[in-house]
Structures are given as structure tokens and as C-alpha cells.
């Protein structure tokens, strides 16, 4: 679904809040699967009826609110300390995430430790360790600020239509419509949720098979919103990880989850505080935690995240108005100063504290709940989930889905996992990062199926668009402002042919075209053609002043390279190339001598390079080695009338060799020493070689004085 379709559906959901019908409903709003939900409700009510024989049943409702959802942990800690039982949990968004983990048997103390120790800058990203990213992709990201993938291959497009988009009617844009395929490849969210999904998969081991959520250690149900139908999807059965991932798919932040013909986003769009779901399941006493803005005052709506959260609240306002009337203990922590993306260690710790403080302020009401129930505390109905971050597991089988046989074999060889040996979370995440870093797959998820050792590991890869378009902006004293453009065709295939075109529009423009063939196991072979124009003042690099041709030591040159390359596919990066260069100097003004003509020189060139630095511009470790060789074997001139001239008198071929070594060595967490050594040799005397090729000393970057 393209960004345009998401916006239209977003508006439809916002404007399509359904009123209650005259007949009795289980829920405030119609659900996506009312028949299936009714069956789940009846089964859960029977379970709650057994508890009701000895005491009233207690349901906990946890509202959505992004980072503010950490307040739920503070509330849970107070409930534990006072022996207040929780017989079922319903939640939305971050409330669904916290509620789901608590339902799996994690205590409030464990959740507090998890949230405050988590690196949220990584969690709220699709970042993978740089060691898994190849050098070419690092260079691309350094150059292009914005990358837009587009165009699914037809077989992938058909599967996408079947799994998460409505099938178009006959005659409408669909399977064979290239424009529809192009639009669908455009981004529908900022994050895939790779690291969130990794965390959920690692913490839910033992409960990843398809199951009824009432059979969890604590029964748990959450809400998502289907953009196709505009209805709420009550998550009551099936894949628990998918349910928790879908309920927190904040629009435009996380990409929707596509499943069974639905496009699922944050449940807060329809029902951000699902009290009705909790009541329908048989809760006699409902404790609800609301994270909405505590006031309609303008001071609480200051940032784009405040606006987004308020918009979500407004879209679910009818459900909210009906639900808030049906709560026994209403908790509304003070969240002033925080928004849905206030993720940091200090912020999370304070938000947890505020949740606990709110529970303390309602201690009298909560103690009445304890008296009515006898304060037996929460008793788990099944064993807790296994956390792979703390406990190793064993595997009986490893299966890849979404890969062809060649790719499956390739990634099997990359894995450092074997049957019969203990594995931990980091072992699985390493191969997930390796697959995702190729850029060939839109999503890479994993599940371990089974209820005890040995488990079956399944890795699911969903192919993404095969082409991309890149846009970058450069501003410095060399270019003033330059626009970088890139079009890559087939660049998101793991192997096979690809074509890449890059352009820079500015004072010193260039164009580069490359055709490459990438082998699955082995290097990449390519041929490239590059043309570049430059206008330099060799002594004054700033172009903020005069551009008068009379100023000293100015030259313009135009070069064209044809090269054949052999390049590594994966990190560490190395490359070898050889080729031919033709360059000319249509104008130069050197030490008072000005000349306007075409003075063409020809050279053969060769290059060897190795680079395993973790960052191109600000590395913390690694080394870069470069060796270049040029053989200038010809010089041809044309006079000012454009007539062909002769080889320059006295010209003889010459050699240019250069070596560069750069090393990065970190000293503690804050300092890195960057060491560089550059050597350059020219074989002929000063008078014979072109001034463009002469050795100059000075400046911070080698060669910048020319």
C-alpha cells in the first residue's frame, strides 16, 4: 500500500467512526471478525465464571501512548505489591506490548529493568551492526540522504496482493499494471520494526505457535486497526508476536503489518483504551490506565508527536467516551512534558515512576479491590515464556521461507548455528542482520516453534522492491550547493545483473554509469563510464568570492574514465580495477600564463583498495589501504579553431604511483586517533608533465592543492 493509499485510509478511518446500533454489541465498535470474536468471548467467559465462584474477576486495561506506556509498569508494580490479582489484560499499542509481556509471566521488576536498560535509539530503528553492511551500501548512505525503493517483481507483487491488499476487480489496476506496482513499492512507513520484532521473538519463546490467547499464563487480548475495512481487529488468537507488533504500528512511524488480506496499524486509531473488550471477556472489576492528554490546553500540544497522539485520540473518541463510563478504577498518570517518542533511559525511568505515583494516589480504591478479591495476587495459568536473552535453547530444525534454493544455501553457510548445540538470541540476530543488511528483503522475521526444547527455527524473508532512487544534498566551499541523484535498477537483488546511474548537479558536475553482475558466492564484476567536469582555483578553494578568469592559478578540466572492476560483495570491502582515461583542459591560467584550447591527455590506470573501517568519515576502528597507478602515454592538442593539432613537442610518457594508508584506533569510548600516510611518485621532470599531475605539498587533504 502506497503512502497515498495510507493517507486516504487514514482519513476514512478518522471520518468513519461508527455509532452504536440498536441491537446489543459485544464491543463498542464493530470488529473485523465478529463471529470469531463471539466464540472467543464465550470461551473466555466460561473460564472467568470458574474464578467467579470464589471471588470477583479483575481485568486490567492498558491504553496506548508510545513511550508513555512505560507508566503501565509502575502500575503493575503497585498491583503486585498489594496482592491485587489480574485475571485478564487488554491493551492497545504500547499498552499491548507491556500487557503482552506481563501476560507471558514477566514481572513488573523484570519489565522495568528491560525498558530502562534498552537502547531505544536502536530499538526505534532498523539499524543492524555495521559489520554486516557492505562498503558500497555504506558509501551510498553517506552520499544520499533519501532513498526511495520502488517496483516489485511480478511474482512478489502477486503474493503481496494476496497477503495484505484487496485483490483488484477485473479491469482495474492490478497484477499486470506497472504503474500500480511502482506506486506500491513506495514507502508506507519509516520503520519496518526489525529490532522491536527481534525483541518480541526472543522474549516469547514457548508461545509462538498459533494459539488461543486465553491460554497464555495470563489471558491477554489486544486491538489493531485494519486500514482495508476501517474496522478494529481484536487480536484473540493466532500469532502472538504478530498481534503485539500490529497493535503498536504507529502510522507513518512503523510500516503496517500485512496479513490475511488486512493492513494492520496501531489499534489506537479505533479503540485506544479497550475497556469494552475487557468487560466482554467477563471482568467484574476493571482497572484502566489512560495515557491521553490530561487537558485540552494548548500547552499540551506542542510537537508533531503531540499532534499525532491527539489525532489518534480524536479518531477513537467515540469508543473512548463509551469506555470511560465503564471503569471501576480509573488511573490517569501525569504525562506532562513527555510525548509518544520520549524514549530515553532517563525519560522511561521517570515515566515508570509517574505510573507508580498515580497508583499510590488511588491506593484507597485499589485496596478496596484487594479486599473484595482477598488479595490472592496474580497466579499464572501456565509456565512463563522463555527469554532467549537470558537462557539458551536447542534447535531440532532450521527452515528459511521466502528464499530461492540458492539463497537458502547461501545463508545456511553464513549461519553460526547448528542443530544440537545451545544457541542464544545474539546467534539468531546475527543471521537476521546478515540477511536484512543485503537490502534485498523488505522484512526479515523469525520464530521458534514448540513449547520446549528442542525448538524449530523458522526465518521468514519478504522480498522488497528491486529498484531504488536516491537523492542527496551537499553544501560546502567546494560546491556551494550540489544535488546528488541516483537511480539503481536491480540493485536489491542478491545476485544477477544490476545497473546504476549517478549524477551530481553543481559547480563541478559529473555523471557515472555502471553495469555490474553480482555473483552469489564471489565478487562483483562491473564496467563503468564516468565523465566529470571541474573548475578549480588551485590556491583559493573558496567559491564564495569572485569567479573572474583573470585570477591566478585557475583551471578547468574534463575527464572521462572507462574502467573494469572486480569488487567484493560483502564486508570487508576490497576492489581492483583497471581502465583508460581521457582528460582535457579547455582553459587554464597558471602563474600569469593563460591558454584556451583542448589539450587532451590519455592514460591507463589501475587501482587496488581495501577498507574495513566501520564508518567512512568518522571511523572508530579499521584500516583503509589504497594504491593507484597511472601511465600517461599520450598528449594531443586542438587549436582554438577546433582543428586537430599534433602531439606536444618534447612530450614523453610518464608514470604516477600513489599509496594511501588510513588507520583508526579508539582510545576508550570517546576518543579515536586517526592516522594517515600518503605517498606519491611522478617519474618525469617538472617541465614534461602536465601541471595537473605534478606533486604539490600543503593542505589538509592530499591533492587538494590541485
Image: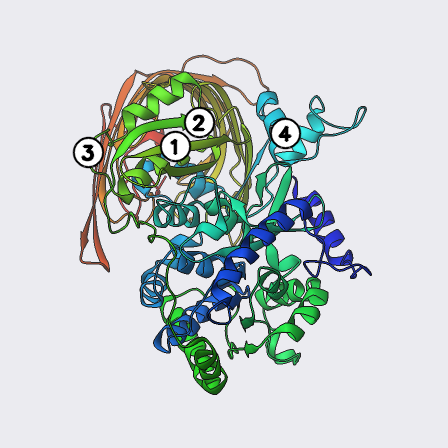
Q: Residue at x 72, y 27 (%)?
A: 174
Q: Give whichever of discs 1 and 3 has the lower sequence position.
A: 3
Check residue 162 in the rendering and tell me which mark sits there, or answer none: 4
- What colour scheme was applied to this rendering of the protein? rainbow
Residue 699 percent across, percent down from the top left: 30, 48
Residue 286 left/right relative to 561: right
The vertical placement of 78 against 153, above or below, is below
According to the picture, the residue beneath numbered tag 3 turns out to be 421
Q: Considering the numbered disc 3 on the image, is that residue within a helix, a strand or a loop?
A: loop
Residue 256 percent across, percent down from the top left: 58, 45
Q: Is residue 593 visible?
A: no
Task: Assess whether mark 1 and mark 4 are in contact (beta carbons under 8 angstroms).
Answer: no
According to the picture, the residue beneath numbered tag 2 turns out to be 401
Q: Residue at x 33, y 30 (%)?
A: 693
Q: Give whichever of discs 4 and 3 has the lower sequence position.
A: 4
Crowd around label 1: few <14 · some 14–19 · many ≥20 (10 Å): some
Q: Estimate the spatial distance between the alpha carbons at disc 4 and disc 3, rounded to whole Å.
A: 38 Å
Task: Assess whether mark 2 and mark 3 are in contact (beta carbons under 8 angstroms).
Answer: no
Q: Give whichever of discs 4 and 2 has the lower sequence position.
A: 4
According to the picture, the residue beneath numbered tag 1 turns out to be 458
Q: Estimate the spatial distance between the alpha carbons at disc 4 and disc 2, rounded to whole Å.
A: 17 Å
Residue 542 percent across, percent down from the top left: 45, 51
Q: Considering the numbered disc 2 on the image, is that residue within a helix, a strand or a loop?
A: strand
Q: Residue at x 49, y 56 (%)?
A: 220
Q: Estimate the spatial distance between the alpha carbons at disc 3 and disc 2, rounded to whole Å.
A: 22 Å
Residue 650 left/right relative to 262: left
Residue 176 occupies which quadrant of the picture?
A: top right
Quadrant where the C terminus sits is: top left
Check residue 477 in the rendering and tell me which mark sits there, or answer none: none
Task: Assess whether mark 2 and mark 4 are in contact (beta carbons under 8 angstroms).
Answer: no
Task: Assess whether mark 1 and mark 2 are in contact (beta carbons under 8 angstroms).
Answer: yes
Q: Estimate the spatial distance between the alpha carbons at disc 4 and disc 1, rounded to whole Å.
A: 21 Å
Amino acid at each position: 500500500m502506497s503512502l497515498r493509499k495510507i493517507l486516504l485510509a487514514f482519513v476514512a478511518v478518522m471520518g468513519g467512526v461508527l455509532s452504536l446500533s440498536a441491537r446489543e454489541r459485544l464491543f463498542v465498535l464493530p470488529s473485523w471478525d465478529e463471529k470469531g470474536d463471539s466464540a472467543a468471548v464465550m470461551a473466555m467467559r466460561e473460564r472467568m465464571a470458574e474464578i467467579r465462584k470464589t471471588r470477583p474477576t479483575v481485568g486490567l486495561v492498558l491504553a496506548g501512548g508510545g513511550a508513555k506506556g512505560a507508566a503501565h509498569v509502575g502500575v503493575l508494580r503497585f498491583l503486585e505489591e498489594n496482592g491485587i490479582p489480574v485475571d485478564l489484560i487488554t491493551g492497545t499499542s504500547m499498552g499491548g506490548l507491556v500487557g503482552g509481556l506481563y501476560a507471558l509471566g514477566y514481572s513488573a521488576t523484570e519489565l522495568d529493568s528491560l525498558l530502562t536498560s534498552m537502547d531505544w535509539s536502536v530499538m526505534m530503528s532498523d539499524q543492524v551492526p555495521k559489520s554486516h553492511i557492505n562498503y558500497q551500501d555504506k558509501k551510498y548512505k553517506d552520499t544520499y540522504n533519501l532513498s526511495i525503493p520502488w517496483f516489485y517483481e511480478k511474482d512478489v507483487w502477486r503474493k503481496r496482493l494476496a497477503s495484505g491488499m484487496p485483490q483488484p476487480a477485473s479491469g482495474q489496476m492490478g497484477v499486470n499494471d506497472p504503474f500500480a506496482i511502482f506506486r506500491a513499492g513506495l514507502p508506507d512507513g519509516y520503520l519496518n520494526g526489525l529490532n522491536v520484532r527481534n525483541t518480541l521473538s526472543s522474549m516469547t519463546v514457548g508461545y509462538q505457535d498459533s494459539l488461543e490467547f486465553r491460554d497464555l499464563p495470563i489471558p491477554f487480548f489486544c486491538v489493531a486497526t485494519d486500514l482495508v475495512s476501517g474496522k478494529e481487529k481484536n487480536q484473540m488468537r493466532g500469532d502472538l508476536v504478530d498481534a503485539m507488533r500490529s497493535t503498536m504500528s504507529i502510522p507513518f512511524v512503523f510500516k503496517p503489518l500485512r496479513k490475511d488480506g488486512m493492513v494492520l496499524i496501531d489499534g489506537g486509531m479505533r479503540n485506544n483504551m479497550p475497556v469494552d473488550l475487557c468487560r466482554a471477556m467477563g471482568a467484574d472489576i476493571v482497572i484502566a490506565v489512560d495515557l491521553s492528554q490530561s487537558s485540552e490546553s494548548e500547552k499540551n500540544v506542542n510537537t508533531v508527536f503531540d499532534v499525532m497522539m491527539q489525532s489518534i485520540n480524536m479518531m477513537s473518541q467515540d469508543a473512548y467516551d463509551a469506555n470511560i463510563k465503564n471503569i471501576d478504577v480509573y488511573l490517569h498518570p501525569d504525562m506532562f512534558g513527555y510525548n509518544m517518542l520520549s524514549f530515553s533511559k532517563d525519560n522511561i525511568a521517570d515515566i515508570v515512576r509517574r505510573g507508580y505515583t498515580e497508583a499510590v494516589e488511588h491506593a484507597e480504591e485499589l485496596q478496596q479491590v484487594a479486599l473484595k478479591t482477598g488479595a490472592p495476587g496474580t497466579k499464572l495459568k501456565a509456565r512463563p515464556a522463555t527469554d532467549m536473552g537470558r537462557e539458551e535453547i536447542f534447535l531440532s530444525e532450521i527452515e528459511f521461507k521466502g528464499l530461492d534454493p540458492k539463497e537458502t544455501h547461501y545463508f545456511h553457510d553464513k549461519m553460526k548455528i547448528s542443530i544440537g548445540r545451545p544457541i542464544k538470541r545474539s546467534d539468531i540476530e546475527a543471521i537476521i542482520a546478515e540477511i536484512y543488511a543485503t537490502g534485498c528483503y523488505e522484512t526479515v522475521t523469525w520464530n521458534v516453534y514448540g513449547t520446549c526444547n528442542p525448538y524449530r527455527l523458522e526465518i521468514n524473508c519478504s522480498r522488497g522492491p528491486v529498484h531504488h532512487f536516491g537523492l542527496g544534498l551537499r553544501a560546502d566551499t567546494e560546491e556551494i550547493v550540489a544535488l546528488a541523484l541516483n537511480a539503481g535498477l536491480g540493485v536489491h537483488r542478491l545476485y544477477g545483473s544490476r545497473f546504476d546511474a549517478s549524477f551530481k548537479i553543481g559547480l563541478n558536475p559529473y555523471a557515472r554509469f555502471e553495469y555490474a553482475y553480482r555473483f552469489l558466492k564471489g565478487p562483483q564484476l562491473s564496467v563503468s563510464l564516468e565523465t566529470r567536469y571541474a573548475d578549480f582555483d588551485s590556491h583559493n578553494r573558496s567559491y564564495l568570492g569572485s569567479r573572474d578568469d583573470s585570477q591566478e592559478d585557475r583551471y578547468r578540466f574534463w575527464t572521462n574514465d572507462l574502467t573494469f572492476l572486480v569488487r567484493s560483495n560483502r564486508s570487508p570491502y576490497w576492489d581492483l580495477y583497471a581502465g583508460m582515461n581521457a582528460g582535457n583542459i579547455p582553459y587554464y591560467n597558471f602563474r600569469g600564463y593563460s591558454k584556451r584550447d583542448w589539450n587532451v591527455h590519455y592514460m591507463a590506470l589501475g587501482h587496488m583498495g581495501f577498507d574495513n573501517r566501520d564508518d567512512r568519515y568518522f571511523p572508530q576502528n579499521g584500516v583503509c589501504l589504497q594504491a593507484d597507478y597511472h601511465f600517461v602515454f599520450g598528449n594531443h592538442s586542438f587549436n582554438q579553431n577546433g582543428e586537430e593539432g599534433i602531439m606536444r613537442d618534447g612530450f614523453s610518457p610518464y608514470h604516477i604511483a600513489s599509496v594511501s594508508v588510513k588507520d583508526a584506533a579508539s582510545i576508550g569510548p570517546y576518543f579515536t586517533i586517526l592516522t594517515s600516510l600518503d605517498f606519491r611518485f611522478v617519474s618525469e621532470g617538472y617541465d614534461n608533465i602536465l601541471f595537473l599531475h605534478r606533486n604539490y605539498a600543503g593542505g589538509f587533504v592530499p591533492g587538494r592543492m590541485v
